[in-house]
Image (spheres, rainbow, N blue to C red):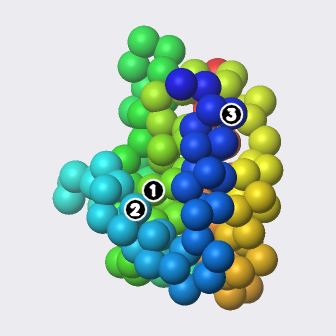
């Protein structure tokens, strides 16, 4: 699937819910399915700077494709990073760098997060794009 197709899937999934409490519950469920980073990957060098909670993101590059694993000590944050991994993992650096993040706005995520979580979301996206730039 392309990044746009995955983003549309996420938009469709979130459109089922009308109440943000239900969307938060869904984010929590998504967080349970995140590809978990190995304990050895929970190093300071994998911590995303700018997040209120601790978020580790690991990238591996294989045959021109970037793969991400992550973990967080906060359950909603884990759900947020799981969305980003779902969109960007398994894609080329060029695809990641060209992608916009409009799906975040379309599902209303950023406007329904606390300012510190919204900053953390932007930090997560920035780190994913940084990895893509480094491997391009």
Judging from the image, what secondary structure is the residue with disc 2 in? helix
Give neighbour class at mark 3: few <14, some 14-19, many 20+ (Cα, 10 Å).
Answer: some
Question: Could you tell me which residue is drawn at 70 percent across and 75 percent down?
Answer: 118
Q: CA distance from mark 3 to mark 2?
A: 19 Å
Q: Callout 2: few (<14), some (14-19), or many (20+) C-alpha neighbours within 10 Å? A: some
Q: Which residue is mark 1?
A: 82
Which quadrant holds residue 43? bottom left
- What x and y, as percent, mark residue 1? 54, 25
- The answer to which of marks 3 and 2 sits earlier in the sequence is 3
Query: Residue 87 vs residue 44: left or right?
Result: right
In the rendered structure, find residue 30 and report the number of the disc placed on it. Answer: 2
For residue 36, above or below residue 111: above
Q: Nearer the viewer, mark 2 or mark 1?
A: 2
Q: Is residue 45 visible?
A: no
Q: CA distance from mark 2 to mark 1?
A: 6 Å
* Mark 2–mark 1 CB contact (< 8 Å): yes
Residue with the most extreme left position: 39
Q: Relative to 90, is 20 on the left or the right? A: right
Q: Position of residue 73 (x, y in %)?
A: 36, 77
| Residue in front for this viewpoint, 40 or 8 | 8
Q: Position of residue 54 (x, y in %)?
A: 44, 75
Q: Outermost residue, top direction?
A: 63
Q: Is residue 63 visible?
A: yes
Label 1: few (<14), some (14–19) or many (≥20) C-alpha neighbours in 10 Å: many
Question: In this rendering, is residue 6 above or below 26?
Answer: above
Q: Label for residue 7?
A: none
Q: What residue is pinned by disc 3?
A: 4
Image point (73%, 85%), residue name:
115
Task: Check disc 3 and report its element: helix, strand or loop.
Answer: helix
Query: What is the secondary structure assignment of the residue under circle 1?
Result: helix
Q: Quadrant of the C terminus?
A: top right
């Amino acid at each position: 699937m392309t990044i746009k197709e995955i983003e549309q899937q996420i938009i469709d999934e979130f459109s089922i819910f009308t109440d943000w409490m239900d969307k938060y519950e869904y984010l929590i469920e998504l967080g349970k399915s995140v590809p978990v980073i190995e304990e050895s990957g929970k190093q300071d060098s994998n911590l995303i700077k700018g997040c209120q909670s601790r978020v580790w993101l690991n990238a591996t590059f294989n045959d021109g494709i970037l793969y991400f694993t992550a973990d967080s000590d906060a359950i909603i944050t884990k759900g947020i990073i799981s969305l980003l991994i779902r969109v960007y993992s398994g894609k080329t650096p060029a695809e990641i760098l060209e992608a916009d993040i409009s799906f975040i706005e379309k599902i209303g995520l950023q406007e329904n997060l606390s300012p510190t979580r919204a900053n953390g979301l932007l930090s997560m996206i920035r780190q994913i794009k940084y990895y893509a730039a480094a491997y391009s």
